[in-house]
């Protein structure tokens, strides 16, 4: 016997909740950093690592990784929309699902740091311009992905294309733009400096808000006001 469970999801409520979580983490991170630089004693505020947006394996990392994985799942659901297989766009949505799943795991496992080590070993340009090595490698990958998705961008609606570009602009301005600035500032002022801390705070904030905006538009695209779950 099969039962049907009705689950209601309000897009605005989800977006507001995720935005509130992001703002809370940013405020806590900023307050701790202010105390950190004011006191000037790293050992006194060792718990900075727990909320520092630039640190690994902490609360902001789990949140950022979760956002990317949520976006990945929504891309998968979007690939299941009726008619996508006929238009030939289903594979593109699944491709975005895979990309964001990778980014989600990368956020937690810091795969890009290993990629950066290989990049700096074979491309001296990253050391010449004082940027983080992984930015160069991922930047090339981004250009390649954009070329592959030209047909996709031409086939989707103009409104969806515009919203996807806004999400990409917000996310990439942090992930690449402010990350490059952070590389320059860390080389000149050090990673335990106010300029670098400001740069990576803006960087991580833009990344979170970019993905939240993406999640919001995907929920709107899917119209998940009502999801039916079948159970036996």
Image: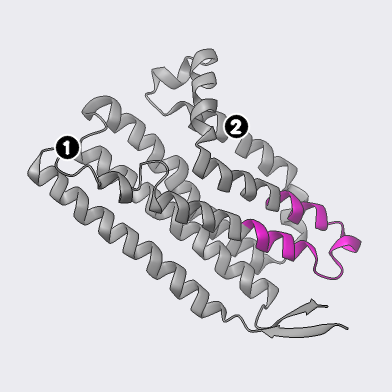
Q: Residue at x 56, y 62 (%)?
A: 214
x, y percentage for residue 202? Answer: 33, 50
x, y percentage for residue 76? Answer: 73, 60
Would residue 171 be found to the left or right of residue 92 on screen? left
| Residue to which mark 2 is pinned | 140
* Span of residues in magenta: 72-96
Label number found at residue 14: none
Would residue 28 be found to the left or right of residue 64 on screen? left
| Residue to which mark 1 is pinned | 42
Instruction: State the quadrant of the C terminus.
Output: bottom right
Does label 1 or label 2 sit earlier along the sequence? 1
In terms of depth relative to the viewer, which is nearer, 82 or 45?
45
Would residue 130 be found to the left or right of residue 168 on screen? left
Mark pair 1, 2: CA separation: 37 Å
Q: Residue at x 53, y 21 (%)?
A: 119
Instruction: State the quadrant of the N terminus.
Output: bottom right
Q: In the image as oriented, which residue stretches furthest toward the right? A: 86
């Amino acid at each position: 016997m099969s039962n049907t469970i009705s689950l209601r999801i309000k897009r605005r409520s989800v977006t507001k909740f995720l935005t509130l979580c992001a703002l809370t983490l940013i405020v806590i991170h900023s307050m701790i950093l202010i105390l950190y630089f004011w006191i000037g004693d790293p050992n006194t505020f060792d718990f900075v690592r727990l909320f520092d947006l630039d640190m690994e394996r902490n609360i902001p990392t789990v949140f950022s990784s979760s956002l990317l994985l949520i976006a990945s799942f929504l891309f998968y659901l979007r690939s299941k929309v009726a008619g996508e297989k006929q238009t030939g766009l289903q594979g593109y949505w699944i491709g975005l699902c895979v990309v964001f799943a990778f980014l989600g795991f990368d956020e937690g496992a810091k795969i890009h740091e290993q990629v950066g080590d290989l990049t700096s070993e074979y491309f001296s340009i990253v050391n010449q311009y004082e940027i983080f090595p992984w930015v160069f490698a991922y930047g090339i990958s981004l250009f390649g992905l954009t070329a592959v998705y030209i047909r996709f961008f031409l086939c989707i609606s103009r409104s969806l294309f515009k919203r996807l570009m806004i999400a990409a602009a917000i996310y990439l301005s942090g992930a690449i733009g402010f990350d490059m600035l952070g590389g320059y500032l860390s080389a000149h002022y050090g990673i335990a400096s106010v300029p670098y801390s400001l740069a990576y705070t803006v960087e991580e904030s833009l990344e979170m808000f970019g993905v939240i905006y993406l999640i919001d538009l995907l929920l709107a695209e899917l119209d998940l006001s009502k999801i039916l779950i079948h159970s036996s």
